Amino acid sequence: METDHLLDGLFAVWRVMRRAITMNQLSTLTLEQFWLLHQLRQNGPMSVGELSTILGVTPGSVTLACKRLEKDGHVTRDRQAHDERIVRVALTPEAHIIIEAWLEHRREVFARFLERLEPHEQEDIMQVIERVLEIANSSSEFAELSSKGTFDDNSPI
């Protein structure tokens, strides 16, 4: 199969999935903000540096995003007493509720897509996804991206 054709297909699926999950958003969060909050939900409070590594973005980008999320009441940011350069970010109770609503919405949206496939087709897709992720995670070419969580199975989508 031609690589460009395969990539075009993968990106088309990604666009459909992204559009489907954001069409009926339950809040004003972007997918990127959701992903940041989702990491905090999974890992608990984290430093800006830890978040930037997982998300694969600069600490400055994380700081800016966290300031906006703090202003909106979704996270708290606390400087550490032992080293004021370190800022720990944590979810607020309200953010937990929003995250759970997004996850439920995501499950509903994708269930509608996937229920149209036969069980064996769903299994085939999952096997291909697992294989692609296995190759990406073991490839030295993608080692840097993988270490930043890019091929992590914790994707919000």
Image (tube, rainbow, N blue to C red):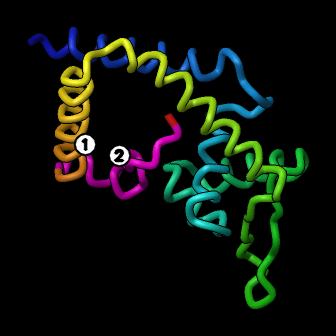
Give the residue at x 64% y 21%. Answer: 22
- In the displayed structure image, the side of residue 68 where residue 5 appears, left or right: left
Query: How many callouts does the rendering have?
Result: 2
User: Closer to the camera, 102 or 108?
Assistant: 108
Quadrant of residue 11 in the image?
A: top left
Residue kind at label 2, given as amino acid type: Phe
Answer whether residue 116 is magenta in the image: no
Neighbour class for label 1 at 10 Å: few (<14), some, many (≥20)?
A: some
The residue identified by callout 1 is 133
Identify the secondary structure beneath mark 2: loop
Neighbourhood count class around disc 2 (C-alpha, 10 Å): few under 14, some 14–19, many 20 upward: some
Residue beneath disc 2: 151
Tell me if residue 15 comes above or below residue 151 in the rendering: above
Measure the C-alpha gap from mark 1 to mark 2. Answer: 6 Å
- Which residue is found at the position 74% from the left and 76% from the top? 85
Choose between 72 and 93: the one closer to the eye.
93
Query: What stretch of residues is rendered in magenta?
Result: 139-156
Q: Which three-letter amino acid code belongs to the residue tagged 1?
A: Leu
| x, y percent for residue 126 | 25, 33
Residue 10, quarter of the rendered image: top left
Q: Position of residue 117 (x, y in %)?
A: 31, 15
Q: Are marks 1 and 2 in contact (CB under 8 Å)?
A: yes
Q: Nearer the viewer, residue 156 or 51?
A: 156
**Does 145 appear in magenta?**
yes
